[in-house]
Image (tube, rainbow, N blue to C red):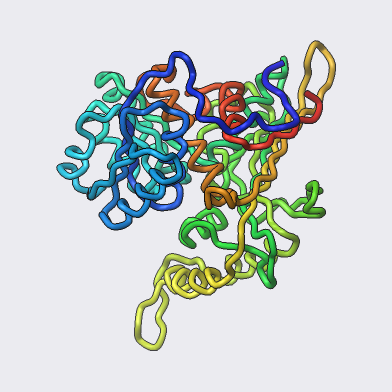
Amino acid sequence: MGVKTGTPQAESSELRPNAMSKTYAILGAGMQGTAAAYDLAKFANPTKILLGDVSLEQAKQSADRVNKLVGQTICHPDQVDAMNPSSLGAFLTGVDVLLSCVPYWMHPHIAKVAVASRVNMCDLGGNTDVTLETMKLDTVAKEAGVSLVPDCGLAPGLVNSLGMYLMEQMDEVDTIKMYCGVLPQNPKPPFNYKLTFNVEGLVTEYDYEAVVLRDGKIDKVDTLADLEDLEIESLGKMEAFNTSGGTSTAPYTFEGKVKNYVYKTIRFPGHCERMRIFKDFGFWNESPVDVKGTKIVPKDVFNAVFGPALDKFVDRDMCAVRAVGVGKKNGQAVRLQVDILDKEDEATGFTSMERLTGFSLAIYAVEMAEGRVPKGAIRYEEAVTGTRFVEEIQKRGIVLKFQGL
């Protein structure tokens, strides 16, 4: 019944026998891009890895870090302007797969250059409307003989692969529920939260509608709503609530096949109520308001003030992930569950957020490089099976705990 182990497979750089040596390019030398480069260096048997950033100094620092960690000069820095087609096109010369780790709104623009350069591309996504823009490139991507796969990070990304894995273990699927939260190991009030990506992305998740399947139909639901309690081993009582982006295109793909498909974010108790205050009282409005004769966008002010204030909470991170599947197997009702509780890796210095996001993206990049992903603009859930992903993520030393499997 697929892959199931109670302990992780040892992290190893042992290559698959049929792995083909390819050139990978990573756009964005920040946290996730650096983690993805490290993963590729260990597991992809690359000819070389290009690490591009608008800041050459940032690219050099990240490339040096990767090279030191793996003990070889495999990662090469480059300066590139992601929004300049000429600069990006030159960067992509001779590249097999591009991993885009830049802000989500850039991905469709980058995808057009990737297609023109005949380079496969996967990205971290995070905003379904933007992902749908990339999906419009399906015809030209097929004509160019390349694959485009958006939303290959953590949520969306890894959580959906766990949901798919559970679906693959059942004959009939009623409900898939996914949960994920990147959390501080030592939470401090009032928000009990550590900012692990930019505050604009956090507010987008908290403020926009969430797309789900309910009773077999697409539904758009309010965020920071449908609060429920979760009991998580070693953490105790936690809370989970609707946020946007986590389901990505999966509700549209699984409509008619799954009755309920939902995603919620995990936080320490009380976080949702506190953040809901900002939403309900207009702090995230995007329409300008007059303040003493000056037009100001409340959301811009909130991001400028709240982001730096939240950045002051410094702590090691951890990530809690849960996927639950309810359905039937061999005519019998089943409830299946997969849990991950991953913590920052002191040996490499990679945070849990970086590991579960960057490593997940790299897994999809390797699948693309080895020709196992269809050509065209492919929805995440149709590009790689959940079973395949579960096999690969465990090779990275990520512990998955299975119930009912």
Q: State the quadrant of the C terminus.
A: top right
Residue at image coords 52%, 43%: 357
Q: Residue furthest bottom?
A: 292
Q: Residue furthest top?
A: 330
Residue 189: percent from left, percent from top? 69, 72
Residue at image coords 80%, 46%: 233
Q: Can I make out residue 237 in this image?
A: yes
Q: Is residue 23 left or right of residue 313?
A: left
Instruction: Please name whichever residue, 382 or 251, is drawn nearer the observer in this view of the structure.
Output: 382
Residue 62: percent from left, percent from top? 37, 51
Instruction: Please name whichever residue, 12 or 239, is drawn nearer the observer in this view of the structure.
Output: 12
Q: Residue furthest left?
A: 86
Q: Residue furthest right?
A: 332
Q: Is residue 103 left or right of residue 50?
A: right
Seen in the picture, residue 202 relative to 358 is either above or below; the reply is: below
Seen in the picture, residue 122 relative to 139 is either above or below; the reply is: below
Give residue 332's quadrant in the image. Answer: top right
Residue at image coords 72%, 18%: 170
Q: Can I make out residue 222 in this image?
A: no
Q: State the quadrant of the N terminus.
A: top right
Instruction: Please name whichever residue, 253 or 219, is drawn nearer the observer in this view of the structure.
Output: 253
Q: Is residue 214 left or right of residue 352?
A: right
Residue at image coords 54%, 40%: 156
- Tag count in the figure? 0
